[in-house]
Amino acid sequence: GTGTSMAQLLWLSLIMTRKPEIKERMKAEIESNLGQDRPRLQDREKLPYTQACILESLRRFPNVPLGLPHNTTCDTEVGGQFIPKDT
């Protein structure tokens, strides 16, 4: 429902507030691929970084707990993206 979607958007907003470089990179990706158009579901293939941020917020802050918490045990890199330990 809308409650879980709103909660997830709030988590993503918190992440972007705490890490403005993430917000700026998402904004730049959206503007360079979509201009002034609103993002649509069909645009997600054009926005891999934004999509990754959304998926990461879902992973880190699930609205409905399913299973055990997931954290990295050491600094690592996946697909060229650095992932720090304990995130």
Image (spheres, grey):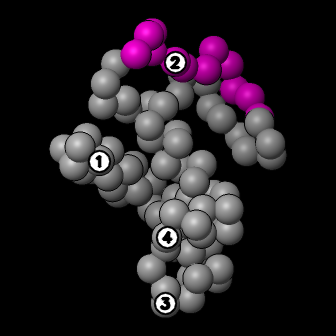
Name the quadrant containing residue 81. top right
Q: Amino acid at mark 4?
A: Arg
Identify the disc placed on residue 63.
Answer: none
Q: Residues within 10 Å of mark 3 (few under 14, many from 20)?
A: few
- Most distant residue in the bottom direction: 36
Q: Indicate which disc, 2 or 1, sits on the residue closer to the N terminus.
A: 1
Q: Residue furthest right?
A: 80
Tell me the CA gap for discs 2 and 1: 21 Å
Q: Which residues are magenta?
A: 66-77
**Distance from label 3 to label 1 (Cα)?**
23 Å
Mark 2 is on which residue type?
His
Q: Which residue is tagged 1? A: 5
Q: Residue at x 37, y 29 (%)?
A: 62
Horizontal arrangement in the rendering, residue 79 relative to residue 72 (left or right): right
Residue at the spot of label 4: 40
Percent x, y of residue 73: 63, 15
* Residue 71 x/y as whole percent: 54, 19
Frontmost residue, 63 versus 74: 63
Mark 3, secondary structure of its residue: loop
What amino acid is labelled 1 in the image? Ser
Residue 70: assigned label: 2
Sequence-first tag of 2 and 4: 4
Q: Is any atom of residue 21 visible in this view?
A: no
Residue depicted at x 48% and y 31%: 59
At mark 1, the secondary structure is helix
Relative side of 82 to 22, left or right: right
Q: State the separation of the CA atoms marked 2 and 3.
A: 36 Å
Query: In the image, what residue type sits under mark 3?
Result: Gln
Query: Do tag 2 and tag 4 residues touch (Cβ < 8 Å)?
Result: no
